[in-house]
Amino acid sequence: MTYETLQVDKTPAGIALVWLNRPDVRNAFNETMIAELTAAFRALDADGAVRAIVLAGHGKAFCAGADLNWMKKMAGYSFEQNYADALALADMLHTIHTVRKPTLARVHGPAFAGGMGLVAACDVAVAAHGAEFCLSEVKLGLIPATISPYVIAAMGERAAYRYMLTAEVFPAAEAYRIGFVQEIAQDHELDGVINQMLGHLVSGSPAAHASTKDLLRAVAGQRLGPDLIKDTATRIAAARASDEGKEGIRSFLEKRKPAWVQAPSSSNGGQKRGKSPKGKR
């Protein structure tokens, strides 16, 4: 499928790379990009050859938030039009967050407002030291509503109070300190760190990845009690009885790689360490 605002690449190792491709506006999103991101992630989720998805941005920014021309149009919308527009954005974030494959945000340059929502909707985020973050909505008289469930889960409630209210810009080191990103790297080493993480991801069972993501969504924030205990016991019993669960145990006992692991030449995301997942920046 051809996209107007995205570039989607796939590697032989099963890594899909979704590039925000509006570098002239620092990858700011509009209604077209929102629709295309929703469609792209749904298509990749349905593609059995895809093992993991990387979300990245072309140009000097990961994503600067909302496109100014799109915001101008929204200013003239009725409440009903704004609601439909916001619901499309919320649906896009939910789609990214709930795909069955592991998702990884490759963050460089600014990740502002909705751009932070994209990062938070991914399972893992790796940022270059030069990346910057900002929840700028209140300075425009707006609120970070649709992105809030993902951002609060990623950085924690206390940090969210500060950065959603102050709208201050903060660096990658602070994003790492508060847990918003899980890894930071020197700018020239960013892709090496990502490729190393992709190597770990493609060694996992696809079915187990999907079940683990469902487990995390079900268990996070729940109080331990009889219902949760029974639910987790049911989940591991199902995993043990599954085809991939049986194959994983057999391969461990037989001291071999499980069937879902590709040859060593492709185990690092199909790329040499230190290279961009796409092969060029």
Image (cartoon, grey):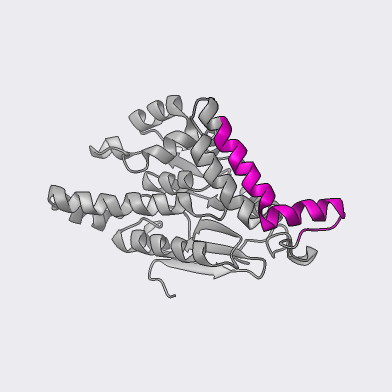
* The stretch drawn in magenta includes residue 246: yes
Residue 192, quarter of the rendered image: bottom right
Left-right relation of 146 to 171: left
Residue 8 percent location from the top left of the image: 50, 68
Foreground residue among 67 and 245: 245
> Quarter holding the C terminus?
bottom right
Residue depicted at x 40% and y 64%:
39
Outermost residue to the bottom: 2
- What count of labels does the image hold? 0
User: Can the viewer see residue 112?
Assistant: yes
Q: In the depicted view, which residue is nearer to us: 148 or 135?
A: 148
Secondary structure mostly taken by the magenta-highlighted segment of the chain: helix
Query: Could you tell me which residue is drawn at 46 percent across and 49 percent down?
Result: 97
Horizontally, is 102 left or right of 137 in the view? right
Q: In which quarter of the image is residue 247?
A: bottom right
| Residue 108 rendering spot, x and y as whole percentages | 52, 50
Q: In this view, does 70 lie above or below 218?
A: below
> What residue range appears in magenta?
229-258
275 relative position to 220: left or right: right
Residue 6 colored in magenta in the image: no
